[in-house]
Structures are given as C-alpha cells and as structure tokens.
Amino acid sequence: MRVGVLTGGGDCPGLNAVIRGVVRKGVQEYGYDFVGFRDGWRGPLEGDTVQLDIPAVRGILPRGGTILGSSRTNPLKQENGIRRIKENLAKEEVDALIAIGGEDTLGVAARLADEYGVRVVGVPKTIDNDLSATDYTFGFDTAVNIATEAIDRLHTTAESHMRVLVVEVMGRHAGWIALHAGLAGGANVILIPEQRFEVDRVCAWVTSRFKASYAPIVVVAEGAMPRDGDMVLKDGSLDSFGHVRLSGVGEWLAKEIERRTGKEARTTVLGHVQRGGTPSAFDRWLATRFGLHAIEAVRDGDFGKMVALRGTDVVRVPIAEATARLKTVDPALYDEVGVFFG
Ligand code: F6P
C-alpha cells in the first residue's frame, strides 16, 4: 500500500504531529510506503512530491507549520483539475490519500471521494475551531494560548497608561478564539462575528470600567461587525453598510472608542502569530491521535471519511458532514459567558 499525504489551507500548529503519527504507524505497524504532496492540492495537481518516510518525520512533533508546505489551491477551480489529480495519483502509484485541512481542503476531498471515487481519508485542522462534526480541531488550543498570553501582557500596559486596549484575534466567521482567549484572559468585552455589536454599548462599558479605575480590554474577532457606526475595513470589499473596507475592525473600533469616549485607545492585531510556532501539548495529543486514526481508516478501506473528536473518542464521520456547515458560537454559549463582564 502506498499512501499520499497532503496539508492544505492556512497552516496550523499540529500539522507535523499528524504527519508523524500517520507515517510512523503506517510504516512500523502496516509496512506501508508514503509519498508527500507539496502545498496542498497543488501537489497532486502538478505531480509535485516530496519523500516521506521515518527519517523525514524525525523531530517534527514540536515543530509548527508543515513539512509538506500548504496552499489554498482548489483543483475544482482549475481546468481539468480532477483529471490531473487522478493521473498524478496513478503515476505515483498512490492507493490512498490522506488530506489534512480545513473547510476548503476537505470540501475538495469530499467531492473527490463521493463523486470521483478517489480513496481519501480526511483529517480536520484549523485554528478557528469552526469545523462541524468534530468537537475540537488541533491548532485552536495553541492559538487560544497565544492570544491569552497576549491579553495578559496587554492588561499590564493598559493599566499603566489607563488606556483602552483593543485586541483583534483571528476568526472570520466564528468567534471561538475570541471567546476562549477573552474569557481566559479576563477581557471586559468580547466581540464575535456571530453577533453584531453595538459600539455605543462597548463605549458605555469602557466608560464604566474607567470609573471603577480599570483599564478596559476589548477582544474582537476579525470578522465581527458593528450594528451601528460606519465600519470601513481593509480588504477592498464592502461592509454591511456598503462602504469600502480600509482598516481592520480592531483599528476601526479603537478610533470609534476614542472619538465617542474621549479615552485613549490602542489596537493590537495578533494576526499570524496565532498560527505560528510550536503546538501546545493538547494540540500535539489531538493531532497525533488524528494521525494514528487516519492511517487506521486507510487500513480499513474506510474512505470518504474524516477523523473527528467526539468527547474523548476519535470517531470517523463522512467528510461531507464536516464541510456542510460551519460550527459557529451558539448564542446561548455567548450569553452564558456574558458579552460584557469585568
Ligand atoms: O482559517 C484560518 C485563518 O487563520 C483565519 O482565522 C484567518 O482569517 C485566515 O486563515 C488568514 O488567512 P491567510 O493566512 O491566507 O491570510
């Protein structure tokens, strides 16, 4: 049995731990051969491969990123993409493929398996934790720890200058990182994409915090949107008010807070720091388990499936189930945490 492995989409701490788990168990227990495809779906699309064996995975467990490289290439959007992938898999004599990725990568995997008969097993990853069908994705815990540490640090500088500190974290469609890191870091306001926020309410809370002699910390997910105010964001697209996006939500919100409260505000955009570096112990644990279960699914010929964490068990679910809808923050959970607290 020869197994191809690829990592697609935005990178995420724990990808190397999956690759290591897959290869070690595959070689040592089942006697399989492996081939790595470079840069997500670009690898099988262009026949770009890399050697993948025991020496290649030695020492990679604590390393962030992915030794296979990653990209957001979508073969379904390329001319003859499916045919080229099938040809290159045949050329490499690949019997089964393990695709490690988020919504887009797994969406391609689901279609390849369900519509084109490619023997694929999926492994879910994203720091955003927004894939349904699995309780957690690896990478999320590391990102939350990084964001929490940043919030801890921002508290002390905010207090020293009695300023508002706005922290923008990742999460375009789901506020999991904002919610978990905000709670763990003792932020006063947590704003998520699932629920529009009112700038006036944020400002009222900021003012009340200053009255109690605290410097407020506002955590905002990059995809959060105001209910009131003209938000102008950075990527050239239009916001819900039809305005061109010129700056990030964090930067915009800090300016609005200053304008409406007269208090000094600063913004920290954590950005890709949340995706880089060594995975946390939890992410190594989860990613390694996913790897071991993925190669087991290959051995069982259980294709079109994705490994998923349910409680403390790793189970297999149809890949299509994971990509059918995003797992967003439940309003009840958001309410339970309390949008504003201090
Ligand atoms: O999906 C993971 C993620 O890190 C998002 O949280 C973020 O919005 C996006 O990727 C950033 O993508 P890129 O690295 O392509 O800028």
Image (tube, rainbow, N blue to C red):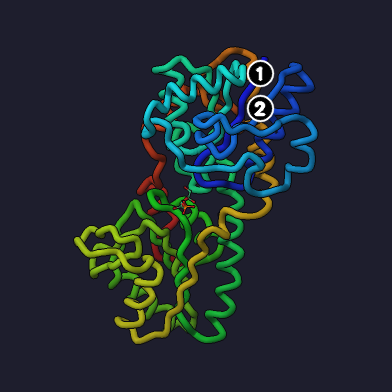
Secondary structure state at the residue bearing disc 2: strand
Q: Classify 44 as above or below 66.
A: above
Amino acid under disc 1: Arg
Residue 205: x and y in percent read 37, 74
Instruction: Give the residue drawn at x 73%, y 42%.
Output: 61
Residue 20: x and y in percent read 71, 34
Instruction: Give the residue drawn at x 43%, y 78%.
Output: 209
Q: State which quarter of the image contains the N terminus.
A: top right
Residue 166: x and y in percent read 45, 71
Categorize mark 2 by other alpha carbons within 10 Å: few (<14), some (14-19), many (20+).
Answer: many
Dots 2 and 1: beta carbons under 8 Å?
Answer: yes
Q: Which residue is mark 1?
A: 2
Instruction: Give the residue drawn at x 44%, y 66%.
Output: 341
Q: Is residue 54 visible?
A: yes
Instruction: Give the residue drawn at x 42%, y 66%.
Output: 189
Secondary structure state at the residue bearing disc 1: strand
Q: Is residue 309 visible?
A: no
Q: Is residue 330 left or right of residue 120?
A: left
Q: Which residue is mark 2?
A: 35
Q: Determine the image quadrant of residue 136.
A: top right
Amino acid under disc 2: Val
The residue nearer to you, when weighing 294 against 342, is 294
Q: Exactly how many numbered labels are in the figure?
A: 2
